[in-house]
């Protein structure tokens, strides 16, 4: 009887050991397939074999299957993890079609196979600092930062150094935000305007001569924990005497980013304009739409960006709120725009099923 009581008491420990062994099994299996995918991808880039594309897709399918199986066996609940970061809404993610302002073909947003069923949460990393460069375009070369005759490649270089030095996840994108048409250097992208999120501040006048100095100042701001929530104020102070550079705090309350990089993947080029049309229409109804030159406070600006990753989950929608939320939604359609405006932009809540990544940062109060 004593042995029986000891056995009963040890059940939680035994269960924990079993779960740990299962986790290790899935990790080992997933790691091996990940290495195989990397080898196949390298072969694809080097054109070593014509079968590389098909094999790479099959490996990706296997990886997604393992994620699903692991989730079911271990009972992992993404909603529980997400709710520890941001509040989860109980509202339906999709509105009634009659509430949607934009007519669209459902086939434009239809996903198949693993793309429609693979777990989304943690398929992308939360962004610590997002660097967005205005280009005035809605589509770009395959590698948007390698456009000849511009200094865009310098932004990528400095962003990489910043990430490595500070140990943070820095993401760089180009956007369709308007350029200064009266300035030839701006039009040729040799003088850049950059938006920093979630700092909600923009720097205008970045050139090849001052970019290193500006990024060094950004590094010092990132490295000081006392600057949390006041990065824009500190940046404005540190750059106020730099010749030709203008720093301005953003009046917008939220930014919505939509991948429209058709050259990279046509699905993004098709879905993004439809999504933006719906966002713009619904935002106009509640007087939150903002176009270039409209600096009324607390508006919502919707921007096109280049490749963000995961175009197989199109439409991808990234939202930054000055209130303190970052959310990366995926598998979105115009039927989800109403939720994203009412529940995420205004209500600061998310739908767990469609979240790839999320984070909470210091609320911007200036």
Image (tube, rainbow, N blue to C red):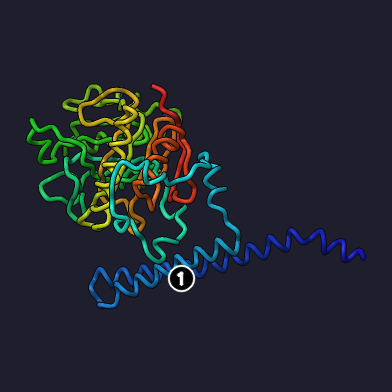
The residue that mark 1 highlights is: 32
Q: Quarter of the image containing the C terminus?
A: top left
Residue at (25% x, 26% y) in the render: 247
Residue 236, image x and y in percent? 29, 24
Q: Residue at x 30, y 69 (%)?
A: 42
Q: Is residue 91 above or below residue 221?
A: below
Foreground of the two, 87 or 334:
334
In the rendered structure, the answer to whether residue 208 lies left or right of residue 31 reads left
Q: Is residue 274 above or below residue 177?
A: below
- Tell me the residue at 24%/53% (across/down): 270
User: Could you tell me if residue 165 is visible in this image?
Assistant: no
| Residue at the spot 25% in from the left edge and 68% down from the top edge | 45
Q: Secondary structure at mark 1?
A: helix
Q: Is residue 220 in view?
A: yes
Q: State left or right for residue 235 relative to residue 4.
A: left
Characterize the local packing of mark 1: few (<14), some (14-19) or many (20 or more) Cα atoms within 10 angstroms: few
Would you place residue 38 above or below residue 238 in this image? below
Asked which quadrant contains residue 286, the reply is top left
Residue 103 vertical position relative to residue 9 in the rendered view, above or below:
above
Residue 111: % across, % down: 36, 61
Across and down, in percent, residue 29 comes to 50, 70
Q: Is residue 198 left or right of residue 149?
A: right
Q: Nearer the viewer, residue 242 or 228?
A: 228
Q: Quadrant of the N terminus?
A: bottom right
Extreme residue in the front direction: 98
Judging depth in this view, the residue of 219 and 300 nearest the camera is 300
Quarter where residue 166 is shown: top left
Q: Position of residue 76 (x, y in %)?
A: 57, 56
């Amino acid at each position: 009887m004593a042995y029986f009581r000891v056995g009963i008491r040890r059940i939680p420990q035994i269960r924990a050991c079993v779960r740990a062994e299962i986790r290790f099994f899935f990790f080992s299996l997933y790691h091996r397939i990940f290495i195989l995918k990397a080898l196949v991808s390298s072969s694809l880039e080097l054109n070593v074999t014509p079968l590389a594309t098909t094999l790479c897709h099959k490996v990706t399918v296997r990886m997604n299957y393992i994620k699903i199986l692991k989730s079911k066996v271990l009972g992992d609940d993404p909603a529980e993890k997400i709710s520890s970061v941001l509040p989860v809404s109980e509202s339906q993610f999709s509105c009634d079609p009659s509430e949607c302002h934009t007519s669209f073909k459902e086939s434009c947003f239809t996903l198949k196979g693993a793309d429609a069923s693979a777990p989304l949460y943690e398929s992308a990393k939360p962004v610590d600092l997002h660097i967005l460069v205005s280009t005035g375009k809605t589509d770009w070369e395959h590698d948007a930062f390698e456009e000849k005759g511009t200094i865009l490649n310098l932004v990528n270089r400095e962003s990489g150094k910043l990430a490595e030095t500070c140990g943070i996840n820095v993401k760089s994108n180009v956007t369709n935000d308007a350029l200064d048409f009266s300035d030839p250097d701006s039009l040729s992208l040799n003088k850049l305007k950059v938006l920093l999120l979630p700092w909600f501040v923009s720097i205008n006048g970045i050139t090849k001569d001052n970019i290193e100095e500006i990024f060094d100042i950004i590094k010092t701001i990132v490295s000081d924990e006392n600057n949390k929530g006041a990065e824009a104020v500190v940046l404005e102070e540190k750059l106020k005497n730099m010749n030709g550079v203008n720093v301005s705090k953003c009046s917008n309350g939220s930014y919505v980013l939509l991948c429209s990089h058709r050259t990279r993947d046509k699905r993004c080029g098709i879905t993004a304009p439809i999504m933006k049309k719906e966002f713009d229409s619904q935002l106009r109804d509640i007087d939150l739409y903002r176009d270039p030159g409209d600096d009324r406070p607390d508006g919502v600006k919707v921007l096109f960006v280049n490749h963000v990753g995961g175009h197989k989950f199109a439409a991808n929608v990234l939202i930054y709120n000055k209130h303190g939320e970052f959310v990366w939604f995926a598998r979105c359609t115009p039927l989800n725009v109403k939720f994203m405006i009412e529940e995420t932009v205004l209500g600061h809540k998310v739908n767990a099923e469609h979240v790839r990544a999320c984070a909470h940062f210091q609320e911007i109060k200036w």
